[in-house]
Amino acid sequence: MKYVVFFFALLCMPPLGVVMSLNRRWMKYAVWVMIGALAAYQATAINFFSYEEYRGSSRGMEVSVVYLMALALLVAAAIKGRLPKFIPSFGAFLFVVYFLLCLPSYATAENTLFSWMETWKMIMLYLVYLSVRAYLNSTENVRSLVNGLAVFAIWNFLLVVKDHFSGVYQPHGSFPHQNCLAMGMHLFAGMFFAYFITGGWRNSMLYAVAFVASAGCIVRTYSRGALAMVPISFFVTFVLSFMSADHGKRIGMMMRIVPVAAIGLVGLGLMLPRIIERFSEAPEASKNTRIELALCAKEMILDEPWRGIGINNWGIKINPPYEYAELAGRNTHRGEDFRDGIVETVYLLVGAECGLPALAAMVAWFVSYFFLCIRLVKNLAGTLNAAIPAGLAGGLLVCYIQSCLEWVLRQQMNLILLMVFFALLDYLNANVGRLKPLPADRGGANA
């Protein structure tokens, strides 16, 4: 029945796009629906050809309301003549290169259906990217998109609070795992922290609350990697925000740090016993497993350095009858029915599954947006829009570092958020000349 509902919804998207093209406000509501669907992702998505027991980065050909709304937005933008180019930026070009370099891994894949699941996910991610670019091209309304993201962050915090009082040790909000929540909230925390220190409470109470909510989510997950990244993220964000501000406003920024530091110390004091417990009582087996699986990935890369062992085929190739685990000295006495886990770093996972050229393209894609943030902070200096790249620079940096320990950046929800933020950065970069004259203290659609 669910498949029939989604098929009917798909048929409704083109007419919905026609209706949205009649009024920019309806496109704004569509973006909010898309973000709202992301906040309830598990309830608004289904897997075709589902293999829920498979231990890989994709377990089905996932179709979500997020993707359906993205399609409707593209239809509306096409009717208005505001559809972006298929490859509208250098970052988008690098993603397409990364995508194409993953395709040769089909030649070595044991199960091409599993490979198609991950390929489909990448196609849908690019659909989201293009739809956000199309929305911004059509409405020029950055503020409404950021407002929707702020509500998304606050909603996750409310879910975390609910889980906290329900006795959940490591809540995950609307994300599939607490590490996914922590990494995703780093992007939000950095951006709304930059908004707060740039404009204060008067700029937007919503953004200030979203900042506190995002930071609260990160701390309450008790994710060791995410907690270690908090000082780095906030330090980078503050330095970039401080450098982009007018000299007369830098004193005010310093003063706003005081209450943030005070609240942070109080929260740290309340959570400190559990945080210490997470670091001091970390199981040795967890560390050993990470190291052993990393060595397995190394064996796969040595065996297939150019094509990899097959995109989304790790869950097959790490287990019998394949002997990569034995070559790495892991589980040498396992049986035929043993099923091992996935390597806990996105870089080794991509290198093993898709080869070194695809890994290099993915790293270039990631890094290009970090440096785009740095450039945008300089180009948008003196405007409130500079808070977006300043905050995302800190958030992206720690996400990339944290990805050395976790493969979260192959998770659907985190990649969708990444695509939304990348589209936002590319829009700002394409329109920097028009956005820069805006005063930092002025609201409006473009702020």
Image: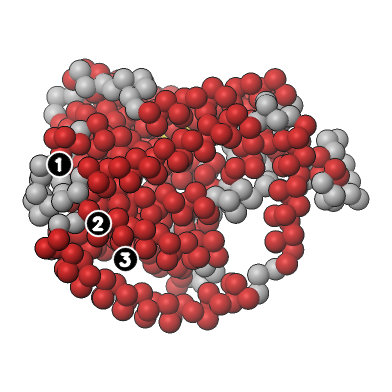
In the displayed structure, 146 sits above or below 23; it is below
In-image side of 53 versus 43 (left or right): right
The answer to whether mark 2 and mark 1 are in CB contact below 8 A is: no
Dot 1 amino acid type: Lys
Marked residue nearer the N-terminal end (2 or 3): 3
Query: Within 10 Å of the Cα at label 1, are there few (<14), some (14-19), or many (20+) other Cα atoms?
Result: some
- Which of the labelled discs sits on residue 243, or is there none? 2
Instruction: Say if 171 sits above or below 65 in the image.
Output: below
> For the residues marked 2 and 1, what is the alpha-carbon distance in whole angstroms?
16 Å
Percent x, y of residue 342: 68, 46
Q: Are marks 2 and 3 in contact (CB under 8 Å)?
A: no
Counting from the top left corner in percent of width and height, residue 371 is at 38, 42
Image point 36% across, 62% down: which residue?
A: 234
Q: Which residue is mark 1?
A: 436
Residue underneath mark 3: 212
Residue 421 showing in the rendered view: no
Q: Secondary structure at mark 1?
A: loop
- Please, what is the three-letter code of the amino acid marked with disc 2? Met
